[in-house]
């Protein structure tokens, strides 16, 4: 039956993790409408070259994250935040304060996207103070979206697998 096939696919996509948070996958078309509509996800996120860059690009999120992890990000964003996406506040040796989302870091520098969507690269030797945030800037949709809307949004995000 179609419902049984959907459940089987959801189980496989969960990585066979029986301890994962239960999730329901809804309708991707309705989920795109939720993404584009009342959640205003594109105000921060980018998909297929459209949307802002202040939050992670979601173009391939369905290929790189498990459904339970995506659902956790929707309902408990700080708990579901990946370490590379932690907000950062940097004070440079000359006293400038830069806030943004870390996008890369190596032994010599830190790159981040600031609130104006500018890519900023800072040499670690120029950093006087650095603070990694633990709270995501993304709002929680728990209590804002219905269970069906969360399932639909999850289905849309799972459908994003890049080009």
Image: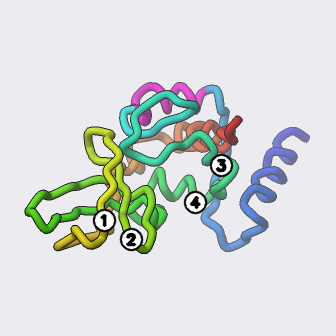
Dot in front, 4 or 3 = 4
Q: How many marks?
A: 4
Tag 1 residue: 123
In the rendered image, the quadrant that contains the N terminus is top right
Disc 2 and disc 3 in contact, CB within 8 angstroms: no
147 relative position to 11: left or right: left
143 relative position to 46: left or right: left
Query: Of 37 and 45, which appears nearest the observer?
Result: 45
Q: Is residue 83 above or below residue 10?
A: below
User: Residue drawn 60% across and 37% down?
Assistant: 152
Tag 2 residue: 108
Q: List x then y, in percent, for residue 37.
A: 44, 25
User: How is the protein colored in the picture?
Assistant: rainbow
Disc 1 and disc 2 in contact, CB within 8 angstroms: yes
Tag 3 residue: 24
158 relative position to 115: left or right: right
User: Residue drawn 53% across and 25% down?
Assistant: 33
Q: Is residue 86 above or below residue 24?
A: below
- Read off the magenta span: 30-42
Element at badge 4? helix
Residue 6 disc label: none
Q: Is residue 90 above or below residue 119?
A: below
Dot in front, 4 or 1 = 1
């Amino acid at each position: 039956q179609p419902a049984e096939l959907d459940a089987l696919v959801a189980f496989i996509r969960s990585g066979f993790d029986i301890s994962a948070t239960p999730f329901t996958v809804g309708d991707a078309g309705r989920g795109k409408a939720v993404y584009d509509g009342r959640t205003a996800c594109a105000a921060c996120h980018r998909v297929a070259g459209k949307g802002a860059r202040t939050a992670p690009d979601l173009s391939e999120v369905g290929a790189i994250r498990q459904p339970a992890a995506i659902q956790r990000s929707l309902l408990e964003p700080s708990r579901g935040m990946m370490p590379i996406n932690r907000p950062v506040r940097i004070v440079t040796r000359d006293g400038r304060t830069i806030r943004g989302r870390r996008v890369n870091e190596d032994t010599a520098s830190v790159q981040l996207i600031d609130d104006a969507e500018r890519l900023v690269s800072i040499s670690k030797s120029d950093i006087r103070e650095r603070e990694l945030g633990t709270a995501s800037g993304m709002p929680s949709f728990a209590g804002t979206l219905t269970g069906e809307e969360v399932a639909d949004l999850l289905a849309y995000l799972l459908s994003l697998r890049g080009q």
